[in-house]
Amino acid sequence: MRKNKLRAEHNNAAIINGWLAIPSSYSAEILGHQGYDAVTVDLQHGMIDFASALSMLQALSATPAVPLVRVADNDPAQIMRMLDAGAYGIICPMISTPEEARRFVAACRYPPLGNRSFGPARGLLYGGADYPQHANDEILTLAMIETREGLANLDAILATEGLDGVFIGPNDLSLTLTGSASAESRHPEMLAAVERVVSQCRQRQKIAGIFCTSGEAAARRISEGFQFVTPANDVMQLGRASREAVAQARGNAIPTTGASGY
């Protein structure tokens, strides 16, 4: 089976992850060739259905980037379907309890380690003929920490057998902790939450990931100890590049925008 380089990469250097919200295989192919270690197809907040996701995973297969999917919710049927479609890892939103974490991981693992139904389809094409024998060892599982309850249960969530790490959804976590959605919040509660995630992941040798608003913000998060960073998504990058190009063409100052991300 094709090795999932992300499972070992975080021990050597930070994983830089691209993020796709636009339903386009062409965009996926372009992003996959830009040097990202992984690229995530976003089914939660992206404008992407299953057919588009399938074509995007196919496009990513022709690039060096590891194909990941953020599912819409902790639905075993969708998780299994995206793995069958060739995703090499799943990011699952709104994991707030150890029971939810166990349910998520179980959907990603074949018996006896989980309850994933057999039918790997594209998994065989991307992973190789021996995919069924090794998928449990290669598929990446990241649980999103986005609620006060999830933060309180962080240690128990990280103790989940088969969970590779957690991924902070900074807007949702900031919203629940401070009442304001801000991916780059400097609120004391948010700063303490971020430090707690990094510290507990380090103690348990799990991946600590987070969504960022830019490459600069991602570099700062790496310096804080995160091993998996997403420097904005395709929508944010397209909008930012377009604003800058228009301003430069008109001889205007490059506009600044508020920090956001999900």
Image (tube, helix red, strand yellow):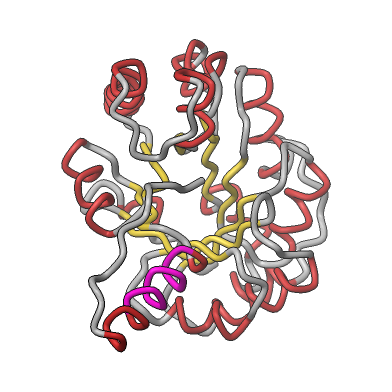
- Magenta residue check for 49: no
Nearest the camera: 253 or 211?
253
Give 18 or 156, whichever is nearer the viewer.
Answer: 18
Residue 102 is drawn in which quadrant?
top right
Residue at 45% in and 77% down? 32
Reply above or below: 30 against 199. below
- Range shown magenta: 236-244
Query: Where, by quadrant of the figure, is residue 99 drawn?
Result: top right
Q: Position of residue 150 (x, y in %)?
A: 54, 19
- Please tell me which residue is depicted at 40% across the width and 82% down the height of the picture: 33
Q: Nearest the camera: 254 or 121?
A: 254
Q: Hey, which residue is sitting farthest bottom in the picture?
A: 249
Report x, y in % for residue 213. Answer: 37, 52
Identify whether 251 is placed above or below 113.
below
Residue at horizontal 78%, vertical 64%? 49
With 11 as the anchor, is 49 left or right in this view? right
Q: Where in the figure is residue 12, as x and y percent of width and height?
A: 21, 52
